[in-house]
Amino acid sequence: MTIRFDGRVAIVTGAGNGLGRAHALGLASRGAKVVVNDFGGARDGTGGSLTPAETVVEEIRKAGGAAMADGADVSNYEQVKAMVTRATSEWGSVDLLCANAGILRDKSFSKMEIADFAKVIDVHLTGTFYCCKAVWDGMRERNYGRIVITTSSSGLYGNFGQANYGAAKAGMVGLMNVLAEEGRKNNIRVNTISPTAATRMTEELLPPQALGLMRPEAITPAIEFLLSEDAPTRTIMGAGAGSFAVIKVMESEGVNLALSDWTPDAVAAHFAEISDMSKARALQGAFEQTQKYVGQAAARAGIKL
């Protein structure tokens, strides 16, 4: 099977450099018409220029593909809507969205300015919401859509000095969980990528020999798979340096305590059993957790549900 995107229209945000550039080039090489979106700012989100996006568009066109540059700021909903309207007017639809745009404003929590926390949330989490919102109705009307949003190990596992970035990236998983459920009936599949690569965002954090292994192009196959016709939905994929993995949020089987043990002391006494992950599983929805706890309580009380 060869994955192709002939006849599909894709928006890739943050596509002027790094990961986004690699994704835009990859999708175009497999037949997609690509909106190369990039605000063209510095790593901290300041400044702005359409040149990076235009350069990528020129690369795609020279290779025989179809692309347009767009400088919408993803944290501005009106600009995002205008980008989607422009793509739809030119090419008829937006079928694929890779929400990749981001900035960094790292500081330890004690030194982090309120404005820097807010701006990172605004670009990463709110900006991703805006992009999804702008394409959603069109995807529902056409009963087809594929969306990949971008989380990070900093949000999934934590990283010093990135309270803003980590909070935004963890929020991506919650957004994916809900959109995947709401999109099922209209064949809209929503997934999340957790990439690690040598980009402007990581170049100061890794030694040269590691950076040489972590080309942005190593992430693009996962993006292409998650945007494909037969993509899964509600999946978090990790990718970097040619490695690919699936990440799940797991919950232990847990312990139901008798009413007489509804105390912090009893929780402490049973904590080893409560935290035993040998029977852990990934729940498939919020209500499944409720059903699990109620079922355990009913079993203790001898109630048949």
Image (cartoon, grey):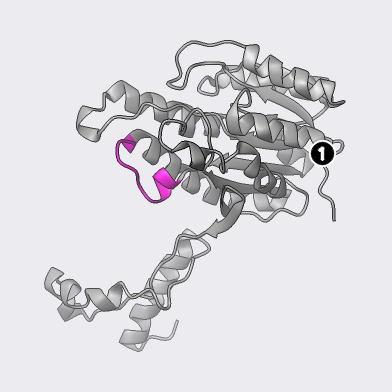
Residue at horizontal 36%, vertical 81%?
A: 298
Residue 255 spot, x, y in % from top left: 30, 78
Q: Which residue in the rendered view is the most extreme toward the left?
A: 265
Is residue 247 shown in magenta? no
| Residue at the (60%, 50%) spot, across then down | 180
Range of magenta residues: 153-163
x and y percent of residue 282 in the render? 49, 66
Q: Which of 281 and 138 is in front in this view?
A: 281
Q: In which quarter of the image is residue 301?
A: bottom left
Residue 230 placement (x, y as % from top left): 76, 54
Residue at left offset 24%, top offset 79% = 257
Of 184 and 91, the residue lying toward us: 91
Up the image or down, 221 lies above or below 51; here it is below
Residue 136 appearing in the image: no
The residue positioned farthest toward the front in the image shown:
209
Label 1 environment density (alpha carbons within 10 Å; few <14, some 14–19, many ≥20): some
Check disc 1 and report its element: helix, strand or loop. loop
Q: Can residue 192 be seen in this view?
A: yes
Query: Is residue 89 shown above or below 151?
Result: above
Q: Name the residue under label 1.
A: 30
